[in-house]
Each structure stands twice: as C-alpha cells, then as structure tokens.
Image (tube, grey):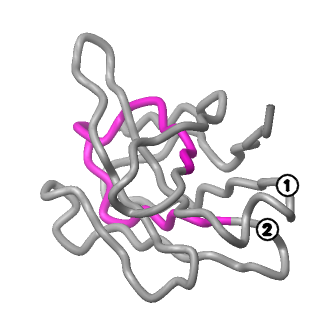
Amino acid sequence: QESLMESGGGWVQPGGSLRLSCLAPGSFFNSRVMGWVRQAPGKERELVARISSDGGTRVYGDFVKGRFTITRDDAKNTVFLILEGLEPEDSAVYYCTSARNLSAPVDFWGQGTQVTVSS
C-alpha cells in the first residue's frame, strides 16, 4: 500500500495564503497523476486540482478561479498546492490523491490536512 503524506494545513485569515505539500514514494510518484480533493463538513468531496505525470496538464475545480496553483517537484517526489486569496468557504480537509492517468479514478488517498479560514 503506497502512502501519501500531506503537510502544510492550518489556520489563516481571509485573504491569506497557505502551501500544502504531499510526499509520495519515489517509484510511485513519477508515473502518476497527483492531485488534491477537499471535503468540508456536511458537503460532498470536490476536486481541487490535478496535475499530470509530466506536469504538462493541470485541471482545477471551477471554484478555484485562479486562486490556487498545483505544481510538482519530481526530484523531491512532492506535489504542492499553493492556496491564495483564501475564503472561509475554502475551509475543509484537503486530501492528497493519486491516479493512474487523468481519466482514471483516484485510487490512493492521503490522510488529509485541515485548512481553516476565519477571522
């Protein structure tokens, strides 16, 4: 069972920024689509962002509206999610995810990291 390890969550005021990181095993990371999904209490899980194995394709949820950026560093086996212009509605648990390709369903999940946006 491959493991995805998130870090970087926390509390931030509205308008603030955070950077989430997800470390994956090296042999696993380079060939996989990596992404982030979030879930707020009482709401459905929703796609935040995905990035292809070569980094050339990025997909974002409609609500992102240019505020978030997903990147990957293959040398560090890490995918990053930069969150900017955070709003209280962005408060959720953010899960690192992985899939075989952009058309495949997510088949690996991290434990999640909490992001709380409030004043």
**Looking at the rendering, in which quadrant would you find the N terminus?**
top right
Q: Name, please, the residue furthest toward the top.
A: 42
Spot occupied by residue 32 in the image (x, y as percentages of width and height): 61, 63
Q: Secondary structure at mark 2?
A: loop
Magenta segment: 79-98
Percent x, y of residue 25:
85, 55
The answer to whether 20 appears left or right of 50 in the picture is: right
Residue bearing mark 1: 25
Choose top left, top right, bottom left or bottom right for residue 80: bottom right
Instruction: Verify whether residue 92 appears in magenta.
Output: yes
Q: Is residue 110 above or below residue 41?
A: below
Q: Which residue is at 33% across, 58% downward?
A: 103
Residue located at (36% from left, 34% from top): 91
Q: Which percent across, then down, holds residue 110?
A: 65, 35
- Position of 38 relative to 97 (above/below): above
Q: Which mark is residue 1?
A: none
Q: Is residue 60 left or right of residue 25?
A: left
Q: Residue at x 71, y 79 (%)?
A: 73
Q: Report the quarter where the C terminus lies.
A: top left
The amino acid type, in three-letter code, at marker 1 is Pro
